[in-house]
Image (cartoon, grey):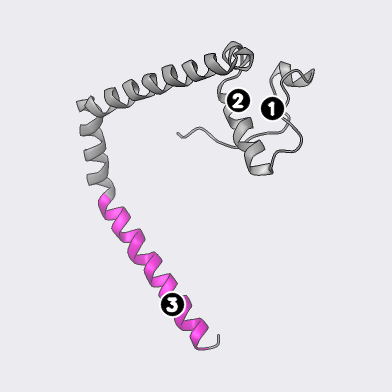
Amino acid sequence: MRKSNAVDETDVTPEDEDGTSALPDDLPEAERKRLMRLRKELRGEELGELEELDAVALRAAIVTASRNLLEVQQARGADQALATAKARAAELDGPYKDGSKHQKARVDYALFLLDRAGG
């Protein structure tokens, strides 16, 4: 099951309630939602720690997190059990995917023809 990316405006950290780390009001809505999703993922001590870092420490944190991300991605790519499961899932999903693609094409083309016929 996938984790929802939906952000509830009431879903804030305690720091937000007293305004010490609230987002600026002048952010575009898309950026505000993106940052709220990030803050939700990082809530707690880690969020507070990042917000207290200076520019040099933030750069170091970015490098560290990027290295950690690379390690996780490499481990994922080297996981033979995961690769086997993905291949099996793709094999099992193939007929459903092909069937869905065919039926969507049929609906889209029928809609085109109906529109062209004026109906």
Frontmost residue, 24 versus 72? 24
Q: In which quadrant of the rendered view does residue 119 lie?
A: bottom right
First in sequence: mark 3 or mark 2? 2
Name the secondary structure under disc 2.
Answer: helix
Q: Amino acid at mark 1?
A: Asp
Please indicate whether residue 118 sits to the left or right of residue 112 in the image. right
Locate the N terminus and report the quarter of the image it occupies.
Answer: top left
Q: Is residue 106 magenta?
A: yes
Magenta residue span? 94-117
Is residue 27 toward the left or the right of residue 37 in the image?
Answer: right
Q: Is residue 72 above or below residue 36?
A: above
Nearer the observer: mark 2 or 1; the answer is 2
**Residue designated by label 3:** 110
Give the camera-side residue of 105 and 48.
Answer: 48
Residue at image coords 73%, 29%? 10
Question: Circle 1 is placed at which residue position?
Answer: 11
For the point 43% across and 20% down, the residue is 63
Please name the residue shown 69% across and 20% down the image. Answer: 13
Where is residue 31? Give x, y as percent.
Answer: 63, 39
In the picture of the structure, the residue carrying the numbered disc 2 is 40
